[in-house]
Amino acid sequence: MSPPTLRILILTQYDAPLYAERALRAGALGYVVKDQAPDEVLNAIRTVLSGEVYLTRAVAGLLLHKLVGGTTKTSRTGVEKLTDRELHVLQLLGAGLSTREIADHLNLSFKTVETHRENIKSKLGLDGAAELIHFANEWAREQGSLPSQPPKRA
């Protein structure tokens, strides 16, 4: 007898194709934004329970475009090189949090967040802190990945 398969549906506040792509690569079968209509969320649950992949039409279109060789804003920026933690730090920078606030929010040391910032700058070819902050703000805006309310500051 084979073990039961775990079917994962991501219910999130972030409607960014990069997050959906990473979720699918990590093993999720679906990705839905929590502000979808209740019927749509139910449809997503049923689809994933049946073993099929569920994506919103918009996210599916963007991922298919990328698959067939199109370029997206995300692929042009080099953000796909970032680890999940670096991506999270970039997102929080884009939401206006300082290094200290990000450290508190993620329960990390200040030095660890500084290291993530340096790695992000290196991977994206950014020269300084101001360029990183500008990039983070623009990227978050393009991705639509800013929460409606930024994380609470400590």
Image (cartoon, helix red, strand yellow):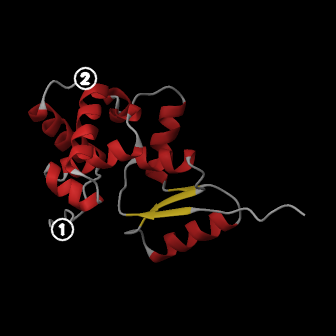
Looking at the image, which residue is at 28% across and 40% down? Answer: 116
For badge 1, the amino acid type reads Lys
Among numbered discs 1 and 2, the one appearing first in the sequence: 2
Residue 138 is situated, as x and y percent measured from the top left of the image, at 19, 40
Side of 62 where 24 appears, left or right: right
Displayed quadrant of residue 129: top left
For the image, the number of numbered tags is 2
Q: Is residue 97 visible?
A: no
Crowd band around label 1 with a 10 angstrom C-alpha radius: few (<14), some (14–19), many (20+): few
Q: Which residue is mark 2?
A: 125
What amino acid is found at the position of numbered circle 2 in the picture? Gly
Spot occupied by residue 98 in the image (x, y as percentages of width and height)? 13, 51
Among all residues in the image, which is located at the extreme right?
1
Looking at this view, is 57 or 104 the one in front?
104
**In the rendered view, does 112 fall on the left or right side of 97?**
right
In this picture, residue 109 sits left or right of residue 85: left
Report helix, strand or loop for mark 1: loop
Q: Which mark is residue 152?
A: 1
